[in-house]
Amino acid sequence: MTTTTLQEETLTAASLAGGDVPPTVSPTKPPTSDPSTYKFLKAMLPHLPLLLRTAVLHLLRLSPQSPYLDLKTALIVNVLRAYINPPNPKTISETKQFLNRFPSIKGKIWISTYTIPTPTPETQSAIQTIFSTAIKTLSLSRHDPSVASPTMPDVKSVEGEWTGYRANANSESRLPSGLSQRELYTEMMKEVTGKSTTLYFHGGAYWLMDPATHRPTTKTLAKVTGGRCFSVRYRLAPEDPFPAAVMDGLVAYLGLLYPAEGAFHDPIPAGEIVFAGDSAGGNLCLSLLQLLLHLHRTNQKTILWNGQTVDIPLPAGLALNSPWTDVTHSSPSCVTNAPFDYLPEPSILHSAEAKRPACSIWPSTPQRRHIYVSDDLMTHPLVSVVLADSWEGAPPVYICTGWELLADEDKYLAKKMWEEGVRVRLEEYEGMPHCFGLIFPGLKEARRCFSGWGGFIKDVVEGGEERGSRFLTVRAGSLEEVERKGEEVSKERGEVIRRRMEGMLRGESVAKL
């Protein structure tokens, strides 16, 4: 393992994970020259004891990670954990600005930027009413009449990146010069062979990242499915808290179904659209699905969309990678799985956030404890979707998780859906951290992850052999698939989860719950 290899992979992983990458190096263009390598090594010096300790314990097979991860991956996981929890964190504004450095577009990828126009005033009003009514109604259904509907954000245009796989390019290929975005879309569609359209929502805790940071992910999904992705540039917190991101998701979905005049794409049937996302993007997928299910249960299946009354159908399926379903981080795995993950366990996270300096956008006015959502909505089923009463009637759902902080909530959600008649495919990977497929694309576990993730998207749109639910544990190294029974996946109960989340909000630790 060379210094350059560790350097490049650490910086790329830190950028995707939303860590505080040292300002001496770029998170999107890993340095290879001698001066940059020197800067990288200098940035690593404070972590040298951690690296040495990790290496020794790993080589002696004494660390929890050693039976499951190679040494290089274990080192990067531990360095990532240190980056994400710096002793002197930057302000929210500085972190957002620093990570807003988008990589250039090159390689085996097509990108065409398209903006779904701002809906008509009548449609804007209809969407705001849908959200305010759903938020209030779902609060009342949980016997929580004190929850007030938040101030509704404006309904705006939604930009996204059409992404396709460019088979005949090489790693250094650039997009053809002189082509308009529409012409780039046309060139992309010449290589699309599958029927699926993946409506993708990136991760980043609802306040970081962008479709540009997730181009390797959407490109790979396009390659595996043979289809195309529309990766949504949804509004981010803290400037635009809940429900702005979910509102953008709904506008994006309707914009695919019923394109405006002059759109690049033709109308796309709901049966060819799959919601997909990682981490917070997975949460957004589930929140949007829960909203659609609520509309169907309450017989609100149509909307006035730009002058026409149209249906609001369910998509073909959901494909989720390490979805974040409990914004309070109260699951037992948030502590027990900490040795395997780069994400900080709650006590460490809270301690670090207490040291974060104030800036113009955070703390917010009025103040709230969570960047994404107001305090009284943290346990709302459109926010912490793990508390949704029912998923009955949902389309098929794929969930990938590792031995990560979010594992318990992901497995509980998969079991609950299965019990309510939803076709579910759960893949749990031994020893793997949060979003490992995105962070460590070189691992064979990552390649297996994308095969299952993209294969599911292709299957639910184009039809395949598999029709029932499956619950798999994928062994580290061998990739052996161990079938599990649905009832064995999780022993969690909904009422216990709610009490634990409410206790976390009162300041109790997971260990006391």
Image (cartoon, rainbow, N blue to C red):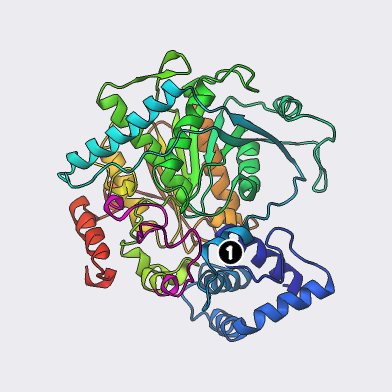
Q: Nearer the viewer, residue 337 or 139?
A: 139
Q: Say above or below: 172 vs 302.
A: below
Q: Which residue is mark 1?
A: 94
Specify the segment rendered in magenta. Answer: 351-379
Q: Give, as a three-letter code, the residue at label 1.
A: Glu
Q: Nearer the viewer, residue 474 or 209?
A: 209
Q: Which residue lies at the image location 46% right of the left edge and 47% below the top edge?
A: 240
Q: Quadrant of the C terminus?
A: bottom left
**Horizontally, is 395 left or right of 272 in the view?**
left
Q: Secondary structure at mark 1?
A: helix
Residue 435 picture location, percent across and down = 51, 55
Q: Which residue lies at the image location 47% right of the left edge and 64% below the top edge?
A: 431
Residue count near mark 1 (Cα–Cα under 10 Å), binned few <14, some 14–19, many ≥20: few
The tally of labels here is 1
Q: Say above or below: 419 vs 44.
A: above
Residue 234 picture location, percent across and down = 52, 42
Q: Which secondary structure is most common in the magenta stretch?
A: loop
Q: Say above or below: 85 vs 487.
A: below
Indicate the quadrant where residue 136 lies: top left
